[in-house]
Image (spheres, rainbow, N blue to C red):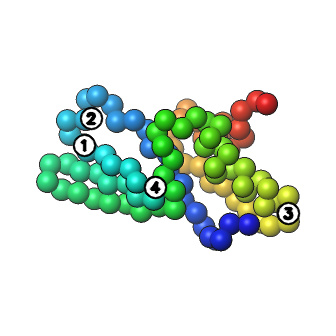
Amino acid sequence: MSKENVTVAVRVRPVAAHEQAEIGLRCEPSSITLSSGSQFKTFNFTQIIDQNATQQQVFDQTALPLIEDTLKGYHCALLAYGQNNSGKTHTICGGES
């Protein structure tokens, strides 16, 4: 069982070419820093998932531990938030084995 009651994992998409001139992005293991000009804003999360991670890696890091805890008798919930067609269902259900 996780030591945390609530965890927030964020998967960052690559910055598009037309956005690179306007937005700076720095990802650390548990924070994201956005910059625009001389302004910086840092957001903290439990886990940042690398933009190069596969869907299977995302599933293994987020959903699989909850499934294992559920089978041990713990109550768990997984919420996925994001744009339409961005892979939320695939991330929750995993790929075909």
The Cα atoms of the two marked residues, 3 and 2, are separated by 45 Å
Q: Tell me the amino acid under the disc marked 2.
A: Glu
Element on which disc 2 rests: helix
Q: Residues within 10 Å of mark 1 (few under 14, many from 20)?
A: some
Residue sitting at x 72%, y 40%: 93
Cβ–Cβ below 8 Å for labels 3 and 2?
no
Q: Residues within 10 Å of mark 4 (few under 14, many from 20)?
A: few
Residue 50 numbered tag: none
Residue sitting at x 78%, y 61%: 69
Is 67 on the left-hand or right-hand side of 31?
A: right
Occupied quadrant, residue 14: top left
The Cα atoms of the two marked residues, 1 and 4, are separated by 20 Å
Q: Which residue is mark 1?
A: 23
The Cα atoms of the two marked residues, 2 and 1, are separated by 6 Å
Residue 53 pos. (x, y %): 54, 38
Residue 56 pos. (x, y %): 65, 37
Q: Which residue is mark 2?
A: 19
Is 41 on the left-hand or right-hand side of 97?
A: left
Residue sitting at x 52%, y 56%: 47
